């Protein structure tokens, strides 16, 4: 089977120039990007998640009539589709069991979608929350930007609009999520929590959240318990997301290696590597991208001590590949032209 990179793109439905989901060839040895091998037209699939079966993915369609679909882009085949629960879905996460999806709708909701057999079928719940933040232009109301599953019985919602991290309990057997959060943690005012990544091992885990509006990475202990995880108190002074001068707007955060994170910093147009010590992430290196608006990054382990990063540079109409050695030096680079790319996802097809 060949290795591919799926790219979700903003289309004309949201003012973008893309065509939907694009598949690029990826060399499994060097990690370099090759030619475009397929295209699956659809409205603004701005976030992608692996569905489990080879060549199949879930896509959040960031349009007013929000939806999530399960598709086989190489065959232009839509396997399932369901409403997302609100307008402008911008993130989709898959439960570890594979049969439940959480879709963050920037318009003000989190949709829980049943996916029996790994295929999106039915919207079963809509979670909403009141509140606002100090930034009148971005925080007039709730704007969930991600919803993730740190473990099978926990859902973590990062709400950019209310400066909140909300923890909900999950009943995997019933494919249901508790309507009321069991915990609400307030982030610093004007933080604008966006995406989260988890580091550590059971019993000593931490969650790291990008603050889109104040250019920070906030670290919190993730306290494992028999009923599911809870969040500890956030770090009092979150680490700056990078050394470049503002305005900087962090986007994606991903685990680069044990004890290391990588953050996309839009505005500065760099990738910032963070070292995690004592559960706290601190920036140590900015890696110039050479392309504008790095919205999303995926990390793929390579051979010979190399790590491959794939970045959607939205405003440069490019997907950029960087190969890093163990010392974090860029030792190879490739690029593919893709219009308005927003998210990248390695696939085997």
Image (tube, rainbow, N blue to C red):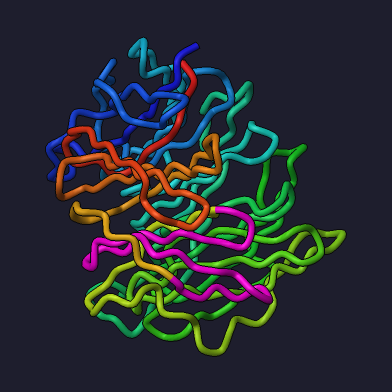
For the point 51% across and 32% down, the residue is 50
Residue drawn 79% across and 63% down?
Answer: 224
Left or right of 146? Residue 90 is left
Q: Position of residue 277 (x, y in %)?
A: 64, 74
* Percent position of residue 226, x then y: 87, 59
In the displayed image of the protein, which residue is found farthest to the right?
A: 226
Residue toward you, 3 or 176: 3
The magenta segment is 257-284
How far from the left and from the top, in percent, is residue 39?
26, 19
Q: Position of residue 231 (x, y in %)?
A: 68, 72
At 35% from the left edge and 79% from the top edge, which residue is drawn?
214
Inspect the magenta stretch and tell me whether residue 310 lies in it: no
The image quadrant of residue 101 is: top right
Q: Can residue 147 be seen at all in this image of the molecule? A: no
Q: Nearer the viewer, residue 249 or 163?
A: 249
Image point (66%, 54%), residue name? 150
Q: Is residue 136 above or below residue 343?
A: below
The answer to whether residue 80 is visible is yes
């Amino acid at each position: 089977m060949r290795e591919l990179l799926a790219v979700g793109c903003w289309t004309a439905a949201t003012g973008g120039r893309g065509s939907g989901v694009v598949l690029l060839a990826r060399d499994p040895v060097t990690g370099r990007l090759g030619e475009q091998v397929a295209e699956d037209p659809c409205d603004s699939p701005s976030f992608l998640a692996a569905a489990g079966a080879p060549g199949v993915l879930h896509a959040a369609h960031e349009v007013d009539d929000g939806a999530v679909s399960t598709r086989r882009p190489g065959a232009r085949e839509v396997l399932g589709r369901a409403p997302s629960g609100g307008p402008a879905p911008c993130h989709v996460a898959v439960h570890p069991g594979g049969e439940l999806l959480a879709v963050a709708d920037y318009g003000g909701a989190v949709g829980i979608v049943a996916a029996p057999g790994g295929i999106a079928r039915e919207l079963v719940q809509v979670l909403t929350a009141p509140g606002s933040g100090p930034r009148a232009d971005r925080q007039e109301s709730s704007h969930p930007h991600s919803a993730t599953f740190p473990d099978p019985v926990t859902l973590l919602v990062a709400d950019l609009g209310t400066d909140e991290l909300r923890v909900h309990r999950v009943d995997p057997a019933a494919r249901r999520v508790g309507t009321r959060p069991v915990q609400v943690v307030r982030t610093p005012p004007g933080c604008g929590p966006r995406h989260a990544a988890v580091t550590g091992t059971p019993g000593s885990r931490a969650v790291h959240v990008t603050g889109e509006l104040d250019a920070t990475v906030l670290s919190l202990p993730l306290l494992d318990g028999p009923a599911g995880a809870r969040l500890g108190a956030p770090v009092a002074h979150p680490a700056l997301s990078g050394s470049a001068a503002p305005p900087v707007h962090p986007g994606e955060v991903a685990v680069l290696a044990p004890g290391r994170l990588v953050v996309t910093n839009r505005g500065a147009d760099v990738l910032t590597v963070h070292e995690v010590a004592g559960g706290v992430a601190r920036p140590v290196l900015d890696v110039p991208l050479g392309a504008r608006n790095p919205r999303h990054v995926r990390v793929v382990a390579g051979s010979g001590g190399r790590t491959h990063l794939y970045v959607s540079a939205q405003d440069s109409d490019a997907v950029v590949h960087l190969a890093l050695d163990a010392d974090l030096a860029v030792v190879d680079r490739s690029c593919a032209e893709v219009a308005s790319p927003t998210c990248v996802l390695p696939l085997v097809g």
